[in-house]
Image (cartoon, rainbow, N blue to C red):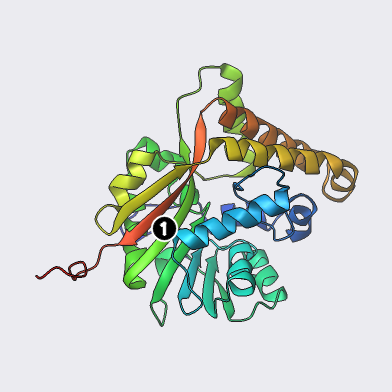
């Protein structure tokens, strides 16, 4: 898989950086403290929810945003260990769906689950060339990986985001919807300790990743996708990360014995600092409903 594009930009975290996050610790590490489907992104909480039910509510909400039906062919960009693919097939009756990832370990887990109608590929999104077009797209937590911190400092991230949305447009049929979940930057931290915490999380747990701002995403998507709805979920991520901290602590002995002191400390520090970052408004997750801008006019309007 290429880690640089033809125009010389090293767009997105490299395959090695992605694999250092997801493959190096191994699937069993994440299985210890994520929900049963292994959904590594913000859940959607309601009264009385557990991490399991809150993650299922989030998956259902995203399927609704993407207007998914059983007849649709669905693409999951950055499919992780298959949580959304599995939910779509088993809970919504989706008959054909495809997931793409840069992580061989994640693809292996998707295949292990033997989900009806689901295929998974290890491929750089810039090299993805589907044989058929899709009716709906879902992506959770992938946009953060496609522009590096250095590119953002050079002001290139919006251009890179734009290319991502253009590719997604080229993979879909007219009338498609895109449910996007991503973390966005909020206000700038002023406390030195908070700045250091965020830097540690980026370097040690999510190397090569960079979050944009809402206006960046809207600008980048606007030529190919109409932004129909935006939902922000800062309070939900506080609850999600706090649940992950609780589960990490509950498995402390197993993690220390199986993966070492340093890994346990890094992940506990990252998730605890995530709670503080979202509580203080430094970042927030957002869910966007995007409608494909088609070459034809909207129904009922003449050319």
Would residue 220 be found to the left or right of residue 31 on screen?
Answer: left
State the image coordinates of residue 231 (x, y, percent, origin top left): 45, 44
> Mark 1 packing: few (<14 Cα in 10 Å), some, or many (20+)?
some
Q: Residue at x 77, y 36 (%)?
A: 265
Say which of 26 and 67 sits in front: 67
Disc count in the image? 1
Query: Up-down: is 229 above or below 243?
Result: below
Q: Residue at x 59, y 23 (%)?
A: 194
State the image coordinates of residue 115 (x, y, percent, origin top left): 66, 77
Q: Residue at x 70, y 37 (%)?
A: 242
State the image coordinates of residue 271 (x, y, percent, origin top left): 68, 37
* Extreme-left residue of the structure: 303
State the image coordinates of residue 1 (x, y, percent, origin top left): 50, 66
**Residue at mark 1:** 4
- Mark 1 falls on what kind of element? loop
* Extreme-top residue of the structure: 191
Whether residue 210 is visible, yes or no, is no
Query: Up-down: is 108 above or below 279?
Result: below
The C terminus is located in which quarter? bottom left
Say which of 264 and 79 sits in front: 79
Whether residue 89 is visible, yes or no, is yes
Say which of 228 and 5 sits in front: 228
Q: Quadrant of residue 163?
A: bottom left
């Amino acid at each position: 898989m290429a880690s640089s594009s033809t125009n010389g930009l090293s767009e997105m975290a490299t395959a090695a950086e992605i694999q250092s996050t997801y493959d190096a610790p191994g699937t069993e590490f994440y299985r210890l403290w994520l929900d049963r489907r292994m959904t590594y992104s913000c859940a959607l909480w309601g009264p009385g929810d557990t991490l399991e039910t809150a993650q299922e509510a989030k998956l259902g909400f995203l399927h609704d945003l993407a207007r998914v039906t059983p007849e649709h062919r669905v693409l999951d960009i950055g499919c992780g260990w298959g949580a959304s693919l599995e939910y779509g097939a088993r809970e919504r009756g989706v008959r054909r769906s495809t997931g793409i990832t840069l992580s061989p370990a994640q693809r292996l887990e998707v295949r292990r689950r033997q989900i009806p109608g689901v295929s998974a590929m290890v491929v750089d999104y810039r090299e993805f060339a589907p044989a058929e077009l899709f009716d709906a797209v879902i992506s959770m937590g992938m946009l953060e990986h496609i522009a590096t911190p250095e590119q953002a400092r050079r002001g290139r991230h919006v251009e890179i985001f734009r290319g991502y949305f253009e590719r997604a447009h080229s993979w879909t049929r007219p009338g498609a919807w895109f449910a996007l979940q991503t973390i966005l930057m909020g206000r700038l931290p002023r406390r030195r300790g908070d700045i250091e915490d965020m830097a540690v999380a980026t370097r040690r747990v999510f190397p090569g990743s960079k979050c944009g701002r809402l206006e960046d995403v809207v600008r980048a998507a606007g030529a190919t996708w109409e932004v129909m709805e935006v939902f922000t979920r800062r309070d939900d991520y506080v609850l999600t990360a706090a649940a992950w901290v609780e589960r990490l602590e509950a498995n402390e002995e197993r993690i220390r014995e199986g993966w070492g002191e340093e890994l346990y400390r890094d992940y506990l520090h990252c998730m605890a600092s995530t709670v503080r970052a979202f509580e203080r408004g430094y970042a927030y997750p957002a869910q966007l409903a995007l409608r494909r801008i088609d070459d034809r006019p909207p129904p009922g309007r003449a050319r």
